[in-house]
Image (tube, rainbow, N blue to C red):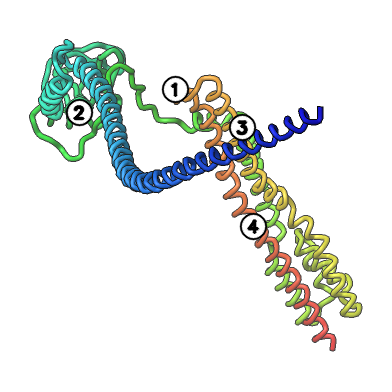
Amino acid sequence: MKKIFVAMTIFCVFAVTMTASELDRAYQKEYAFLKAQKAELEKRLSLDKVQHESNLLGAKEKVVVLQQKLLDLNKMVDTEKQKLVKMSTKLSESKENGDITENVVNQARLTLQEYGITISDDNKTANIDKLEQAFGSASKLYVTLSSLQNTKGEFYLPDGKRVKGDIVKVGNIAAYGISSDATGALAPAGNGAYKLWNAVGSSDDAKALYAGDMKDPLDIFIYENLDKEADYVKEKTVVETIEGGGTIGYIILVLGAFGLLLLVFRVLNLMKAGSNVEKITAIVVNKVESGRGDEALEAIKSFEGSTARVVKSLLRNIGKEREHVEDIVMESILNESSQIDKFGNFVLVIAAVAPLLGLLGTVTGMIETFDVITEFGTGDPKLLSGGISAALVTTMLGLIVAIPLLLLGNLLSGWAQNIKDSMEQSALHIVNLYEKHRA
């Protein structure tokens, strides 16, 4: 058993030794192969690096070229976009111009149709040709309408009578009628008819124009068309003007009349208050200077008025101390002031209230006007005339009433103050003269 075991051990050792030697040779062989492969790979790697760098450089150059092409293409795209925008704008403008041209042609057709001129309406004729036709016809029509034309026709007289005669047309804006019944400027009567204008002074112009003589100036009625009738000129009377102011206008006039009545009473009152001032003063002074001062009161006993009452009060107390006498004089003048200033404040109050009432009428008139505008619009000016008339007339009436009342009221107030000053002056003069002769 031992021999077998030893033999097997030796065999195993030998086998292992033989295997290690083969493995070593195999390893050496494999190593040499791998080393050769490595060298080969390193060489190929070096060549690939060189090739890669060459390819990368070429690619970069191509990228630069492509980028430049992209920039050029972007510029071309932007240019084309701008061209497209311009073309779109031109197309839109062309379309708008076409619409405008078509509208102008239609307007020209409708306008010239009134004068019997027909503009082509077919689709084969270009609008520019239609416009040339319209402008040519309009030029000829302008020459015709801008000249005097004598034609036979009919027109209405102010009383409604229809007469035949000659009609002298001044272009297309005015006309004159000449007939055996009446001659003068014509105005629209509606529906293409004429009527004789009621303003005077145009008959000579009509005859001169009929004879081809242009006068300067012309009494002419210019109209826009003959479809709407023109109203006759009507001069407003004072009553109609006042009626335009409405209720407030009448109130202002009543106040004005009352103010004038007060002015009359005030004038009469001031005339009475300031009467005989110089005469009374002269009588009293004559009595005092002649030493008969005690007879002065009896001498003026028959005189009436504010001045007489002040002097009488003075003479009754003239023998007292001067200060007391002066107080009596001032008190008498103050007592007479209410009589002298009578009605003065009322007149000035009316003068102040009148323009305010006029302003009130203006406001109410404008409110009425705006109410009419809200309901009917601004198409017919006649609907607005009532409110505007009230607005303007009341202001006018207020100023007409206020200005004279204010002026005369202040003048009369100055007159009243002069009467008071003259009474005071006369009283003091009498006192000074009495004390002089008593001394």
Residue type at the position of mark 1: Asp
Residue 217 image offset from top left, x and y in percent: 20, 39
Q: Is residue 199 above or below residue 336?
A: above
- Residue highlighted by disc 4: 410
The quarter of the picture where the N terminus appears is top right
State if disc 1 and disc 2 touch (CB < 8 Å).
Answer: no
Marks 4 and 1, how far apart in space? Answer: 46 Å
Task: For mark 1, give the secondary structure.
Answer: loop
Q: Which residue is mark 2?
A: 203
How far separated are the C-alphas under marks 3 and 1? 20 Å
Does residue 382 sit above or below 356 in this rendering? Answer: above
Local secondary structure at mark 2: helix
Q: Earlier in the sequence, mark 3 or mark 1?
A: 3
Image depth: mark 3 or mark 1 in front: 1
Q: Relative to 256, does residue 275 appear above or below in the rendering?
A: below
Give the spatial CA distance, label 2 vs label 3.
Answer: 44 Å
Mark 2–mark 1 Cα distance, whole angstroms, equals 32 Å
How far apart in space, not on screen, are marks 4 and 2 (Cα)? 53 Å
> Which label was assigned to residue 380?
1
Q: CB under 8 Å between callouts 4 and 1?
A: no
Decide which of 308, 260 is in the foreground and name it: 260
Mark 4 crowd level (few <14, some 14–19, many ≥20, 10 Å Cα): some
Residue 355 shown left or right of residue 420 in the figure: left
Residue at image point 22% right, 30% down? 202
Task: Name the quadrant of the C terminus.
Answer: bottom right
**Pointers 3 and 1 in contact (CB under 8 A)?**
no
